[in-house]
Amino acid sequence: MALHKLGKDPESPNGHSPTVYLDDETGNYLLQGWKVLDTERLAQLDLPEHETVIEFPHRMLRFFPEVNGGSSV
């Protein structure tokens, strides 16, 4: 298995987050983003104990191949 970095948020301070990765074995995406800690927002979700939620900016959609026509940005 190899993870391929598809793109980092160019507007992120210090260039640390968010990031989109592709797992070449499963074809799934891994998303690095900001932890959602706001209890009011979390209470609106049906979130199982084994899952988590991150916040991910709309501008990052361009890094998904399905959105950008299959190219790496």
Image (cartoon, rainbow, N blue to C red):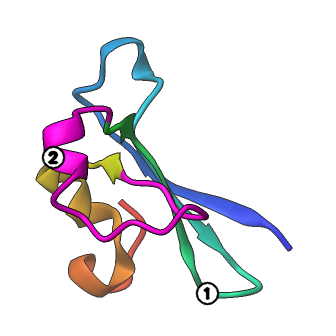
Residue 67: which quarter of the image? bottom left
Extreme residue toward the top, this view? 14
The structure residue drawn at horizontal position 42% and vertical position 32%, both measured from the top left corner, is 17
Q: Which residue lies at the image location 15% right of the left edge and 60% below the top edge? A: 44
Front one among 70 and 44: 44
Write down the region rendered in magenta.
37-53
- Mark 1 surroundings: few (<14), some (14-19) or many (≥20) residues within 10 A: few
The residue positioned 71% from the left and 80% from the top of the image is 24
Label 2 packing within 10 angstroms: few (<14), some (14-19), many (20+)? few
* Three-letter amino acid code of the residue under disc 1: Gly
Which three-letter amino acid code belongs to the residue tagged 2?
Arg
Indicate yes or no whether the magenta region holds residue 46.
Answer: yes
Q: Is residue 38 left or right of residue 29?
A: left
Residue 20, horizontal then vertical, whole percent: 46, 56
- Label disc, if present, on residue 41 of the rendered structure: 2
Quadrant housing the C terminus: bottom left
- Vertical side of 68 occupied by 38: above or below: above
Q: Mark 1 or 2 closer to N-term?
A: 1
Residue holding disc 1: 27
Residue 47 in the image: state x and y as whole percent: 39, 66
Q: Secondary structure at mark 1?
A: loop
Query: Alpha-carbon distance for marks 1 and 2?
Result: 29 Å
Placement of 72 over or under 8, stated as above or below: below
Q: Is residue 36 above or below residue 52?
A: above
- In screen coordinates, is 73 left or right of 39? right
Which is in the foreground here, disc 1 or disc 2?
A: 2
Query: Could you say where residue 37 lies in the image, as x and y percent from the top left?
Result: 32, 32
